[in-house]
């Protein structure tokens, strides 16, 4: 492993996490434990020997650990340690820096559902949360949404000033979106109108159209978000 060889805390941290793919491995673990095969699928451009090396580096540094799940699963997963969770705000800060430069996905871009759901933490616009922010400020949680992307289920819970994303279903979803991660990325980036995606079947909405409008208002990272209720107007046309 190359070193900066500087007596500097930042340089020392970058000796650990500054190499290519390392923080993307951490990103993939921020939604919870993952099997080796899950990590490999989430990082399609990484060679298997390089993934093994990055996992070993993070494990040796005390940032991740391996754990054997009990039966009937009986598989080994990687998960963040307490020290590893300290990298969460670093990954989120990088996501906030990158979201304004992201644009719509290119044809050869891999759109990973985990990465897209984590991106919602960075693209969240509290100023567009409306009643959600007021509810959170009063001590109650804001709206919760369910995403069914590429066969995986996620929950998005809005709080006052921040948003929580996690794997798994919720019984309290204001609405549920079904589709491909790429489709949702195109909608959030402004490349694809949500109404058009619903009309041609690429996106399915379970719940009120107004809740989809609110979700997009809070999480869209398009350069310009229309003030009109695009989804509602299309569905009522």
Image (cartoon, rainbow, N blue to C red):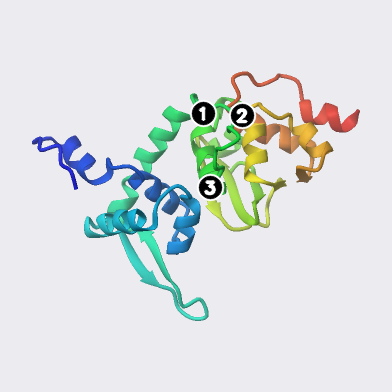
Which of these two is toward me, 51 or 70?
51
| Left or right of residue 20: residue 27 | right
Label 1 – label 2 distance at C-alpha: 8 Å
Q: Of the numbered discs in the image, which one, if any, rests on residue 102?
A: 1
Quick one: label 1, few (<14), some, or many (20+) residues within 10 Å? few
Quick one: label 2, few (<14), some, or many (20+) residues within 10 Å? many
Choose mark 3 or mark 2, whichever is in front.
2
Quick one: label 3, few (<14), some, or many (20+) residues within 10 Å? many
Label 3 – label 2 distance at C-alpha: 19 Å
Task: Decide: is 71 above or below 51.
Answer: below
Q: Is residue 140 visible?
A: no
Instruction: Determine the residue positioned at 86% across, 33% down.
Output: 235
Instruction: In the displayed orientation, state which residue is furthest to the bottom.
Output: 71
Quadrant hosting residue 203 = top right
Q: Of the numbered discs in the image, which one, if any, rests on residue 189?
A: 2
Element class at badge 2: loop
Q: Is residue 113 visible?
A: yes
Q: Of the numbered discs in the image, which one, if any, rests on residue 165?
A: 3
Label 1 – label 3 distance at C-alpha: 20 Å
| Left or right of residue 33: residue 210 | right
């Amino acid at each position: 492993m190359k070193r900066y060889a500087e007596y500097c805390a930042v340089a020392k941290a970058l000796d650990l996490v500054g190499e290519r793919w390392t923080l993307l491995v951490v990103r993939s673990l921020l939604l919870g434990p993952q099997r080796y095969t899950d990590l490999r699928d989430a990082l399609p451009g990484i060679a298997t020997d390089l993934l093994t090396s990055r996992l070993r580096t993070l494990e040796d540094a005390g940032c991740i650990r391996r754990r054997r799940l009990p039966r009937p699963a009986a598989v080994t997963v990687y998960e963040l340690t307490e020290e590893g969770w300290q990298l969460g705000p670093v990954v989120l800060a990088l996501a906030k820096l990158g979201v304004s430069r992201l644009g719509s996905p290119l044809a050869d871009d891999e759109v990973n559902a985990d990465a897209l759901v984590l991106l919602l933490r960075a693209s969240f616009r509290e100023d567009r949360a409306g009643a959600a922010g007021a509810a959170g400020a009063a001590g109650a949680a804001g709206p919760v949404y369910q995403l069914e992307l590429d066969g995986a289920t996620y929950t998005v819970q809005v709080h006052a000033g921040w948003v929580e994303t996690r794997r798994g279903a919720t019984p309290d979803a204001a609405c549920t979106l079904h589709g491909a991660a790429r489709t949702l990325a195109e909608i959030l980036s402004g490349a694809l109108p949500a109404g058009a995606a619903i009309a041609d079947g690429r996106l399915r909405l379970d719940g009120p159209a107004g809740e989809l409008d609110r979700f997009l208002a809070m999480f869209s990272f398009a350069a310009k978000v229309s003030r009109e209720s695009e989804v509602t107007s299309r569905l009522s046309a």
